[in-house]
Amino acid sequence: MFGISDPGIWIVYLLSILCVIGSIIFGIKYWNKEDEADKAENV
């Protein structure tokens, strides 16, 4: 499939795509959340 016959290469591609998707979900979830330390410094 696509000229790549080694399953190890497919696993690496799959894991890299999953990492990108996980990073996007994490970024959307915690986009505007402030840290408690930031709140303490700004007061």
Image: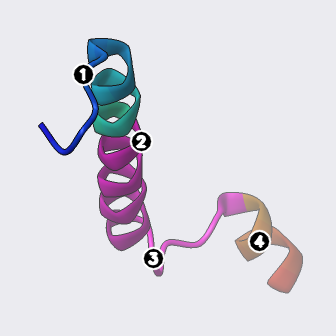
Residue 10 in view, yes or no: yes
Question: Which circle marks residue 16 in the picture?
Answer: 2
Question: Which circle marks residue 31 in the picture?
Answer: 3
The amino acid at mark 2 is Ser
Task: Report the residue at 42% width, 55% height from top.
Answer: 23
Q: Earlier in the sequence, mark 4 or mark 1?
A: 1
Quarter of image, res 37: bottom right
Q: Position of residue 28 (x, y in %)?
A: 34, 72
Task: Report the residue at 24% width, 38% height from top.
Answer: 3
**Along the line of sight, the residue nearer the viewer: 15 or 40:** 15
User: Considering only vertical position in the picture, is 31 above or below 25?
Assistant: below
User: Considering only vertical position in the picture, is 34 above or below 9?
Assistant: below
Q: Mark 4 points at which residue?
A: 38
Distance in Å between CA atoms under marks 2 and 4? 32 Å
Residue closest to the far front = 3
Label 4, secondary structure: give it. helix
Q: Earlier in the sequence, mark 2 or mark 1?
A: 1
Label 3, secondary structure: give it. loop
Q: Name the residue under label 1.
A: 5
**Along the line of sight, the residue nearer the viewer: 14 or 27:** 14
Q: Which of marks 4 and 3 is nearer the N terminus?
A: 3
Quarter of image, res 29: bottom left
In the displayed structure image, the side of residue 37 where residue 41 appears, left or right: right
- Residue range corresponding to the magenta coloring: 16-36
Residue closest to the far right = 41
In the displayed structure image, the side of residue 5 where residue 36 appears, left or right: right
Q: Earlier in the sequence, mark 2 or mark 4?
A: 2
Q: How crowded is mark 1: few (under 14 residues within 10 Å), some or many (20 or more)?
A: few
> Tags 2 and 3 in contact by the CB under 8 Å rule?
no
Closer mark to the observer between disc 4 and disc 1: 1
